[in-house]
């Protein structure tokens, strides 16, 4: 079946612009996660959805970051008034949400460059 | 404060030999561990996982060992193949937190030399 897809794959934004990043999870996956990966680092957690409910947003670095998943499938990560330190790869992952299965499956990421 | 540490940024291994990638963690609440493999310009790909109630899990050429008392896990790849060349990430989670977020190490770049 199809994996997790993300769009766009690459985004260049001027400082101060707003951006929206899209994630299509694996069909039927209940849980959806967003991570931020800086160069040379491992992915860092941003936020977690179970269906349409955002259950954890503790990793969002500032109130400029906002995520939604209104119908429990596609999710959008929005960054307002982008700054240079927002430049990173943004990864989306989904999982079944079973209690005994915690594996997360990642999309290819969106590379955001803020100039 | 890094809770998951991969202290070797890189590792080179001859084709056919064993690759051993190491990972240490500090949070004793972690109860599930995963290894991911990442090629350039792609997202991480899930490889293998282990629950804290086990000390070993095997899947084909990949075996993960967990030593809870030492807070250490390792990934063994036998035999290593050139296609295994990638960055390997160790990740951990605490299933009781309700969030299921993964905490990652910084990765180890494995190069398998033909």
Image (cartoon, coloured by chain):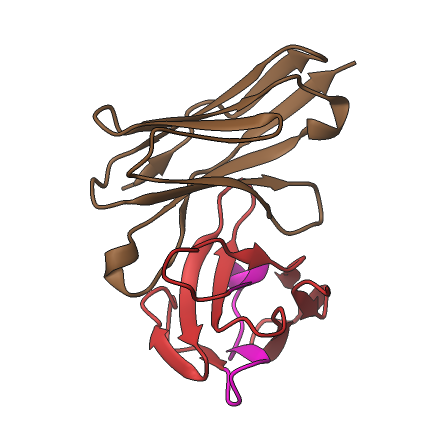
Chain colours: A red, B brown
- Residue visible at 64% across and 13% down in the picture: B13
- In which quarter of the view is residue A11 placed? bottom right
Q: Is residue B7 magenta?
A: no
Q: Position of residue A52 (x, y in %)?
A: 45, 84
Q: How many marks?
A: 0
In this rendering, does residue A17 appear at all?
A: no
Which residue is more in the foreground, A17 or A94?
A94
| Residue in view at x 56 percent, y 79 percent | A76
Q: Report x, y in % for residue B88.
A: 56, 34
Left or right relative to A60: residue A105? right
Question: From which residue to which does the magenta span run?
Answer: A69-95
For residue B113, what is the image quadrant?
Answer: top right
Percent coordinates x, y for residue A55 in the rendering: 33, 75
Q: Is residue A84 within the magenta segment?
A: yes
Q: What residue is at 62 percent from the left and 72 percent from the top? A: A23
Counting from the top left corner in percent of width and height, residue A35 is at: 49, 60
Check the image and name the residue furthest to the right: B114
> Which residue lies at the image location 72% right of the left edge and 13% below the top edge?
B15
Q: Quadrant of residue A101?
A: bottom left
Lateral position of residue B24 relative to residue A69, left or right: left
The answer to whether B99 appears left or right of A112 in the picture is: left
Relative to residue B38, is residue B66 depicted above or below?
above
* Vertical order, B24 against A60 (above or below): above
Q: Say if B106 sits above or below B61 in the image.
A: below
Q: Nearer the viewer, residue B5 or A51?
A: A51
């Amino acid at each position: 079946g199809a994996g997790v897809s993300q769009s766009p794959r690459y985004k260049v934004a001027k400082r101060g612009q707003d951006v929206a990043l899209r994630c299509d999870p694996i069909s039927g996956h209940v849980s959806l996660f967003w991570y931020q990966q800086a160069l040379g680092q491992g992915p860092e957690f941003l936020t977690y959805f179970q269906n349409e409910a955002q259950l954890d947003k503790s990793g969002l670095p500032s109130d400029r970051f906002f995520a939604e998943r209104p119908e429990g499938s596609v999710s959008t990560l929005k960054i307002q008034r982008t700054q240079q330190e927002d430049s990173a790869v943004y990864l989306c992952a989904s999982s079944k949400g079973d209690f005994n299965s915690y594996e997360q499956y990642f999309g290819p990421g969106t590379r955001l460059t803020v100039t | 404060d890094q809770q998951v540490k991969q202290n070797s940024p890189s590792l080179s291994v001859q084709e056919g030999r064993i690759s051993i990638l190491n990972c240490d963690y500090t949070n004793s609440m972690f109860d599930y561990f995963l290894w991911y493999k990442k090629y350039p310009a792609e997202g991480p790909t899930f490889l293998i996982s282990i629950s804290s109630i086990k000390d070993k899990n095997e899947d084909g050429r990949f075996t993960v060992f967990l030593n809870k008392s030492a807070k250490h896990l390792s990934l063994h790849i036998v035999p290593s193949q050139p296609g295994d060349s990638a960055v390997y990430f160790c990740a951990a989670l605490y299933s009781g937190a309700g969030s299921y977020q993964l905490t990652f190490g910084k990765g180890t770049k494995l190069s398998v030399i033909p």
